[in-house]
Image (cartoon, rainbow, N blue to C red):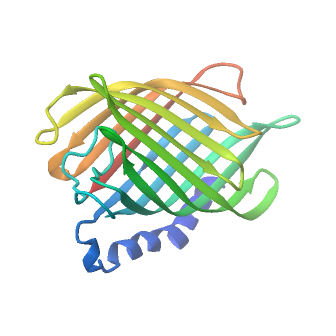
Amino acid sequence: MGHRACHRWWNRSGGWLFLLLLLLPVPDFCEAQTVEINGGETVFSQNSQYYFGQVGDFIPLAGPPVSATGSPSVGTAATGGITLHLFVEVYYLSYETLGPSLTTFNAYNGLNPSVGLRVPVGDGFFEGDVGIALAEGFETNTPIEGLAGIFLQTEYYQALGPGAFDFFANYLGYIQYIYGQARYFIPVKGTPPETVSIYLGPELIGQGNNTYNAGQGGAVLGVSLPKLHSYLTFDGGLLRSSVSTGWGGYQGFSWYVSF
């Protein structure tokens, strides 16, 4: 039921938002802006799934103009000075919780319109975002429910040693759900931004709320394709959640484009 409902919601609410953002006129003061499109899946495992799509806009407020050339190895648009970040994310999140006899299926078709600031920090940046988290909630043997709450997100990226460290986290207020992810990328092929470059490194992920939690550890592979303005990310590893006493696996994929 959750996957079919997700497709219906996407067609009804998500698709037109993507088209609207792409067709918005660009004001004169935003000529140096960078548009981003991002999508994929993350933390796909036996007991949890997260599919997402995002359209955003980086608008420089101070400092050098925004440029998609030379994107950091974390897979995001490169920015110069203080930058305004406007974006809309649509997603499908599901996970299981333990019940009296069987597990309960929980799923959310969500929408997060948000705004934030990206600030240069050393050879990297810090970003903080705030928005509204809206969703349709599905639960086993429970009617569909409309939900709303605050959405918070942060990211810290910094060149460190031979590679780069990236920390990313967000919060869905309507279910008090926290997701945190730490990665370290090491270049193993290519010299960005002129050529195809490959990055490899470890990652740690923690997520959950008061009814579900999971910890993950594995590896992440990044592939930068400058001529296509794209960055591909593949990750996978081991996962252990509150639903099971044993270890399982997880995998994820994303495709980021900026221009």
Left or right of 239? Residue 36 is left
| Residue drawn at the location 63% of the way across and 46% of the way down | 94
Q: Residue furthest left?
A: 194
| Residue drawn at the location 44% of the way across and 63% of the way down | 87
Q: Nearer the viewer, residue 167 or 65?
A: 65
Q: In the image, residue 144 lies at what x, y percent?
A: 75, 63
| Residue drawn at the location 72% of the way across and 37% of the way down | 212
Q: In the image, residue 38 lies at what x, y percent?
A: 38, 54
What is the quadrant of the C terminus in the image?
bottom left
| Residue drawn at the location 40% of the way across and 76% of the way down | 20
Q: Nearer the viewer, residue 134 or 141?
A: 134
Count of numbered labels shown in the rendering: 0
Q: Nearer the viewer, residue 158 or 19?
A: 158
Residue 26 vs 39, above or below: the answer is: below
Left or right of 137? Residue 256 is left
Q: In the image, residue 153 lies at what x, y percent?
A: 53, 50
Q: Nearer the viewer, residue 153 or 211?
A: 153
Residue 62 vs 192, above or below: the answer is: below
Residue 216 vs 120, above or below: the answer is: above
Left or right of 12? Residue 229 is left
What is the quadrant of the N terminus in the image?
bottom right
Q: In the image, residue 96 lies at what x, y percent?
A: 71, 40
Q: Residue furthest right?
A: 100
Q: Residue furthest top?
A: 246
